[in-house]
Image (cartoon, helix red, strand yellow):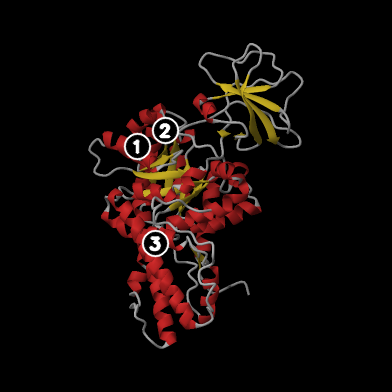
């Protein structure tokens, strides 16, 4: 995947692996190749950074933005041959360069100059130790700005979604925090401002009693693109591959006439239908039903026209088409505001009480600016804005991630949530792991904390027993700065197990870097 940057004039792509035209087994050739790469990264990175600089109001983020711009310039090239050539010399193969692009390149170049036995015209001093690790320090600083101090036993924070019962059950909130939660999440799609206020009061009380700091993230509901009323033919209960579905507009006060000859439902955000053309994919219920548009002006007797969808993928046993299930439109740009009327109303409360605001359906830098403007209207004497966490859940958001980071982190504390549920449906499950890795790399290059979310230890939270795959996923989550658990009857047990897994893994792995502690199993 090629990430987009705003620096379209200076952007170059190299399909040819960097340095393959030279004999890289020679240290002199290797040195000159690295010097050429450094010069390219520096000039292209500076050009991108110059375009970003106007949008950065926090001086402490300037060096992070420059490092991000340099990382993007670096990753436009295929560096695999160069990496292989560096390994036999015992030098960094650049595989963990994210947080410190130029210091890493400079350190390798300085060492190669010593190996070659002479200083070149482009001689650079080896970077000081503190400069080499400055990126790690900045990531820690930005993480503490978002989540507060890390717990003594582990680096990675744990975020827990509060159920509605947390508004009336103080002991539940207290136990969640005692088990290891460092941040609680309130989903603004549910409950009322009164209930949210009681949840926050319980959190603050538990902080005082346990001495455990805990941040409150309030997650704006955002656009909820759902199916409406559903009708099925009398002789059918489930949708199969090859079936057809009529997708019409959900209009207030209207209902679908019955009986029907084909499955019918409607879209709760009807203006989206005007954007779809023949062959556009439409996914229903987290992709359990995958369809494509075959007719944009299909009509049935006594009913309003809509889109005729053909089911391209469904379980061999069929899938029930249900109301209130999500609709996804991969490959379709949806020019819709991420802030709904409900969100704007909720912000009156959220802007005052939340430490962090979760922002759904973010796609462009203008979306970040919109929320910042709305927060400024509701500042109510707060010295600082609440932090923002952008939920990355569409392919467009992934492509625009560098700009989202610059516009947000350039003004306030900021983090990124990898919303793996919607993101997997949008980009395809087979690409989720690849894109998840790239998001982690881009955020580390910008020294921005990441939240690893969606279905973490899901079976454990809901049923009391984790799957083997879930435990591996939880261990891999150590490379983020925070892991989010959803609500469920066994949430306390899940927090305790996740706390143990993250603490253990920290002795073995730090971001992409293996930690070689002594092995005790042999």
Q: Which of marks 2 and 1 is nearer the N terminus?
A: 2
Residue 376 locus on image (x, y percent): 27, 37
Residue 119 locus on image (x, y percent): 36, 84
For the image, the number of numbered tags is: 3
Few, some or many C-alpha atoms within 10 Å of disc 2 (few <14, some 14-19, many ≥20)?
some
Q: In this view, does 10 lie above or below 223?
A: below
Q: Residue at x 37, y 40 (%)?
A: 366
User: How far apart are the two marked residues, 2 and 1, measured between alpha carbons?
Assistant: 9 Å
User: Which image quadrant: the C terminus?
Assistant: bottom right
The residue nearer to you, when weighing 327 against 20, is: 20
Which residue is labeled 2 in the image? 337
Q: Earlier in the sequence, mark 3 or mark 2?
A: 3
The residue nearer to you, when weighing 329 against 279, is: 279
Q: Residue at x 33, y 78 (%)?
A: 125
Q: What element carries label 2?
A: loop
Q: Is residue 240 above or below residue 26?
A: above
Labelled disc at residue 70: 3
Q: Residue at x 46, y 43 (%)?
A: 391
Instruction: Give left or right: position of 161 versus 434.
Output: left
């Amino acid at each position: 995947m090629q990430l987009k940057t705003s620096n379209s004039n200076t952007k170059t792509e190299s399909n040819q692996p960097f340095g393959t035209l030279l004999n890289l087994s020679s240290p002199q050739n290797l040195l000159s190749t690295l010097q050429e790469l450094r010069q390219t990264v520096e000039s292209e990175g500076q050009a991108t950074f110059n375009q970003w600089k106007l949008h950065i109001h926090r001086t402490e983020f300037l060096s992070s933005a420059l490092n991000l711009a340099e990382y993007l310039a670096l990753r436009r090239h295929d560096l695999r041959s160069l990496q292989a050539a560096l390994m036999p010399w015992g030098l960094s193969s650049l595989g963990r360069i994210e947080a410190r692009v130029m210091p890493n390149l400079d350190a390798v170049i300085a060492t190669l100059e010593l190996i070659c036995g002479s200083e070149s015209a482009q001689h650079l001093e080896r970077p000081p130790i503190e400069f080499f690790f400055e990126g790690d320090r900045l990531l820690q600083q930005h993480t503490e700005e978002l989540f507060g101090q890390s717990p003594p036993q582990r680096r990675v924070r744990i975020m827990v979604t509060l159920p509605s019962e947390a508004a009336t059950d103080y002991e539940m909130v207290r136990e969640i925090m005692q088990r290891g939660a460092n941040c609680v999440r309130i989903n603004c799609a549910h409950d009322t401002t009164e209930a949210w206020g009681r949840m926050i009061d319980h959190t603050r009380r538990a902080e005082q009693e346990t001495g455990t700091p805990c941040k409150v993230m309030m997650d704006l509901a955002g656009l909820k693109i759902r199916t409406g009323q559903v009708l099925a033919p009398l002789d059918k209960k489930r949708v199969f591959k090859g079936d057809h579905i009529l997708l019409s507009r959900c209009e207030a006060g209207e209902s679908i006439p019955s009986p029907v000859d084909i499955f019918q439902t409607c879209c709760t955000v009807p203006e989206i239908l005007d954007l779809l053309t023949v062959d556009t994919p439409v996914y229903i219920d987290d992709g359990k039903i995958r369809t494509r548009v075959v007719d944009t002006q299909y009509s049935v007797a006594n009913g309003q026209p809509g889109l005729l969808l053909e089911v391209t993928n469904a379980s061999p046993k069929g899938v029930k088409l249900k109301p209130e299930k999500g609709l996804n439109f991969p490959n379709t740009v949806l020019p819709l505001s991420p802030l709904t009327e409900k969100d704007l109303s909720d912000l009156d409360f959220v802007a005052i009480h939340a430490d962090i605001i979760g922002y759904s359906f973010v796609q462009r830098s203008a979306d970040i600016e919109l929320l910042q403007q709305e927060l400024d209207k509701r500042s109510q004497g707060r010295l600082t804005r609440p932090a923002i966490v952008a939920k990355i859940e569409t392919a467009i958001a992934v492509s625009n991630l560098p700009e989202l980071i610059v516009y947000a982190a350039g003004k306030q504390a900021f983090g990124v949530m990898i919303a793996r549920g919607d993101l997997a449906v949008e980009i395809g499950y087979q690409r989720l792991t690849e894109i998840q890795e790239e998001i982690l790399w881009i955020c580390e290059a910008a020294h921005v904390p990441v939240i690893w979310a969606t279905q973490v230890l899901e079976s454990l939270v809901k049923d009391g027993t984790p799957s083997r795959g879930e435990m591996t996923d939880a261990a891999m989550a150590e490379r983020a700065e925070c892991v989010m658990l959803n609500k469920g009857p066994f949430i306390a047990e899940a927090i305790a197990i996740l706390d143990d897994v993250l603490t253990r893994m920290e002795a073995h792995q730090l971001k992409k870097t293996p930690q070689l502690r002594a092995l005790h199993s042999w």
